[in-house]
Every structure is written in C-alpha cells, then in structure tokens.
Image (cartoon, rainbow, N blue to C red):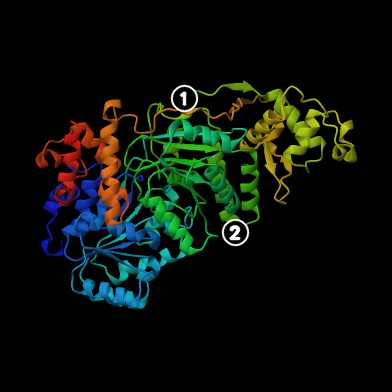
Amino acid sequence: MQTQKMTSTAALEILQTIYGFDEFRGQQQAIVDTVIAGGDALVLMPTGGGKSLCYQIPALARPGTGIIISPLIALMQDQVDALKALDLNAAFINSSMDAQSVAQTENALLAGEIDMLYVAPERLLMPQMLSLIDRCQIALFAIDEAHCVSQWGHDFRREYLGLSILSERYPDVPRIALTATADERSRQEIAGNLQLTEAASFVSSFDRPNIRYAIGEPDNAREAMLQFLDTHHEGDAGIVYCLSRKKVEQTAEWLNKQGRTALAYHAGLSAEERQHNQTRFLREDGLIVVATIAFGMGIDKPDVRFVVHLNLPKSVEAYYQETGRAGRDGLPSNAWMAYGLQDVINLRSMMAQSDADEQHKRLENHKLETMLGLAELTTCRRQALLSYFGDTLEEPCGNCDNCLHPPHTWDATESARKALSCVYRTGQRFGVSYVVDVLLGKDSERIQRFGHERLSTYGIGKEHSALEWRNLFRQLIARGLLAVDVDGHGSVMLTEAARPVLKGIETLHLRELTVATGKRQGSAGRRKRAMAEIAEHDQPLWNALRGLRKQLSDVAGVPAYIVFNDSTLADMIAIKPRDRTEMASVSGVGQHKLEQYGDEFLEVIREHA
C-alpha cells in the first residue's frame, strides 16, 4: 500500500475497497478528514464504534507511516495480523522480538515500506526509537487507550505521561488520541497531558444498544451465572470478571467441571501462561476467560457474546469499558453482573487502606458510590449509564433488566429502623453477619459473651430471613446510611444520613430482594444463542460458513474473525450472493478478501441455496 498513498478525497474509496464498508458511521468521516488535513483530534467513541478506522485510513491516505501507540504488546500481533489480512504492510516493534527481527523492521521503516507500526509507549520513548522516527516520514501518531494518561481514570499508566514529547518533537505531525471511556474530568486531563487542548474534540454517543445490561444480587452467584450461560450462551465466547486472583482460579476450575472450557487470566500467572491463554481466547471459538481487570484492554475479538461480573467493579468507567468488550460486532450481547454485600465492604476497605492521598481516596469513594447507585437503581440502567458520561437517552431503553422486568419496591422504613437501631445498640463495632444474628435472636456463645441477648433489638427481626436482612443492609450501605469501618474488620457504623430514618422523619423505599432458584435449565429449556436472528432454515448455512471460516483461519494461523467476523457472515446469509459482484456488496468484504476468500464462501452459499 505504501506506493499508493492517496489524498483526503480518497478516504471513502479506501473504506470501500480495502475495508469493504459502503459508508462511514457517525463522526468517522469528520475525524478522518481532520487528521488527513493535518489536524489533531481527541476522539471518544464506544468500543465497537470503529475507532481504529479513524487513524488507519488517515495513515493510508497521508504520506509516510502511521505510528500507533498501544499499551499492550500482547495484542499487537493480532492487530497486525488483521491489517495484513487486508493486504496492508503492518508491523510492530516490541520486547517479544529478537534483535534480528527488530533490525529488519527498522530497515523497512526507514525504507518507507510500512503503512502502520505498533509500539508500546515505553518503547516509543526510548532514545534510539525516537532517533529512528526522526529519520522517517511519519503520517500520524495515534495514541490508543488514551484514558491511560489520566490519573483520574481507571487504567492510569505512568509511561503515557511522557507522550507529551510528541507535540514538541514532531509539531507538524498530526496526533489523534482515542478512548472509549472518560468522564469530563478525565477528558480534560487527557487533553492537558497530551497537549491536545487545541485539538478538535469528537465525542460520540456512548450508547451500545446491542448490549443488554442486567445486575442482580443472587444468593448463589455461581449457580445463577451458570443458569444465565445455559439459558442464553451455550457455546459462546465470553469473559467473566472477578475481583481477586483466588476467585479467578476457583471460578475457572468450577466452570471446567460444569463442562465449559474456561481459562484463568491474572497478573499472578507467568507472562507465558497469560499470553497462551489470551491467544487461545482470541483464536478458538466458545472459550471463556475468567479474569481480573488485568485482562481485556484492547481486546479486538468481535464475537464476545457476554461479559459477566461476579464482583462489583470499582467505578462506572471500569464497568462500562469491561462490559463494552461484548458485542463489538454489533450483534446482540449480554452484560450480566452479580454482586453482594461483601463486595461493598471489601472495596471500601481496600480503598481506605490504599496508599493514595486523601484527594484520590475521596475521588475513588465517589466513583464507588456512583457504581453502587447504578447497581441499586430501579429505573432504566442505560439512561443512568449514559448520563454519567454526559450523554442522554430520552426514553427508557427497553433492553435492560429494569426495563424488561421492572423491580418491585417496598416500604422498608420500619425494617431499616430496626437494623440501624441494632447497629447502634451493639456498639457500632460488629459486622453485618453478627448484627443480623442479633436481629434474628440467634442463641450463640458470642452473643451471650457480649450480653446482647438482653438488648431490646434482640430477636425483633424474625419477619425477615438472614438473606433478606443482608440485602437490606447492603442497600443501607449503598445509600450511605451505614458506613463500613476502615479497620479491615468490616464493622458497620451509623452515618448522619441515618438520623432522619431512625427518628421517623423520613421514609425509605428499597428494591425487593429477588432470590435466584439456582436450578439449571435442561437443554430443552435453553434459549437459542445470541445469533437467534439467523432464521431456523438458515442455521445449516450459518454453521457451514463458520466451519469454512475456521478451516481458513487455522491454515493462516490467525483468529477466525480476521477472516470474516460474525456480522459479515450474517450479512452473507441475508444477501446470499450468487457471484463476486454481489459478494462485494457484503459488509466487511473488501477487495483483497474478495479475491482471497470470495469463491470458497460463494461455493458454500450455493450448496445451501
């Protein structure tokens, strides 16, 4: 492609002939035009919104090589493979390469033979790398996952701060910074730290309408997750997030015992094992990765059909970015979360004991409070989620759990007064489990040791089960009527906000507890997978196309989606092209892929006509 550099007027032609898309989406055209013309851009666009095209097309249209700064070297290979599948000259330089390979890539860069080069920020900032770039013609710098530069964000990477050197050292080279998640404060810091305060700003809608959000508090989160997977995602690929490494290991092992293929991923594993598991996830169908938040940034796998959280995330930004790894291809996907009282206690305790300064602790607590608010919400979750990022949705979405199954609320004032009073009378130095035992009138040695069987609140809560009381306490903590002590023992204490409820001045309405049965549905009761929009009579063709794709990707040694993603196969089924001309109209079939794969897929389609 290097010998065929084009002007900005050819951007649409690049989109159509190389990438196989008829037209730009949303703000893509304006972003591409800005960068091709030499302007800087700050781009906020949801995962799956087409961010990569915003720098790849200008890199092809402008003279020189596009330098893409990516935070994870583990993903560069797949990003480069995807570009090579389009017959583009892409490469990376990172620490996984031997000296000879690095030298060959550097020589190709100096010769102007590379369209796009991927580097990590640490590598880019090395003096020898900057010296190499000084001797090259550079089309642009693209700073991916730009929220990493913000200390107010959720994935801060200190090395990103050094990228401000680009504006000083290469003032005539356009820069484009891209991220899927950043609130207003983080956006300002990104612009400031990268010296992009004068850059054109493009903020797309944060809405991902293909993702269905659901948040609950089941009694047995694992069993509820398995029921969810059996019902909606038999054989689908997905990600399960857990807060601790231990829980990651245990959950992966448990899923494997249930007949699922699950791989663990966390920072405690060796680099080789993490790389192996990530590669399997990207290249095999139907795998589940159970991970801490160390997994996922920059994951390009488009057919992740579900993201599960078995613990409460620390912030709305983290939740949005992690759930956004589902359904990048635009097809129906699920974001399902189970959380409980212990999550709230653990996260608050971790924040209180961190080494951060008080300003950061206040910020982190505010972010957690907002995440709790989203979890306990009784109205449309999507409206609240978008509102957090300054986006609006006029009507309820109709595609979240609260819209589909509006939660019931109840007047919890009297029960809350009992709970708060019991916390007060036991001295505000015990955890929730102990207070619940007092409310239920348990005959335990510990209660007798403290003499709490003589309290007026002893046994006054027998109208609720222990599970219902824990649900009530969780909501009282979420609403700020109770605080969790920072001593690490999880004792609960009254806050000033509890006073009006205790004194009967305010009433309190909370969402009812819905207890999952924990029973798994048999095969006959399972819903079809997320590809239910493929008609029943087209299922054999769908399976045949996926089978061919798997064969071709295995031969090429690349993930299946690099051949064609699910949405392209679905478009083939909708159009059922009869020849190359009609195949060229399928979304995602560019000129090179048409020549490389078109005839084989046409043959399969004809066989099922």
Within 10 Å of disc 1 (Cα), the crowding (few <14, some 14-19, many 20+) is few
Regarding residue 196, the answer to whether it shows in the image is no
Q: Nearer the viewer, residue 473 or 566?
A: 566
Question: What SS does tag 2 mark?
Answer: loop
Residue tagged by mark 2?
Answer: 357
Q: Nearer the viewer, residue 379 or 561?
A: 561
Q: Nearer the viewer, residue 459 or 477?
A: 459
Q: Is residue 307 left or right of residue 493?
A: left
Q: Is residue 485 left or right of residue 245?
A: right
In the rendered structure, which amino acid carries the disc numbered 2?
Asp
Q: Is residue 282 left or right of residue 538?
A: right
Residue 480: image location, x then y, percent: 64, 38
Q: Is residue 7 left or right of residue 387?
A: left
Look at 73% across and 29% down and name the residue there.
502
Look at 76% across and 25% down and name the residue there.
461
Query: Reading the chain from its start, which is encountered first: label 1 or label 2?
Result: 2
Residue 314: image location, x then y, percent: 54, 47
Q: Quadrant of residue 134?
A: bottom left
Against 60, is 287 above or below? above
Residue tagged by mark 1?
Answer: 525
Question: What SS does tag 1 mark?
Answer: helix
* CA–CA distance in space, label 1 to label 2: 52 Å
In the rendered structure, which amino acid carries the disc numbered 1?
Gly
Residue 231: image location, x then y, percent: 46, 30
Within 10 Å of disc 2 (Cα), the crowding (few <14, some 14-19, many 20+) is few
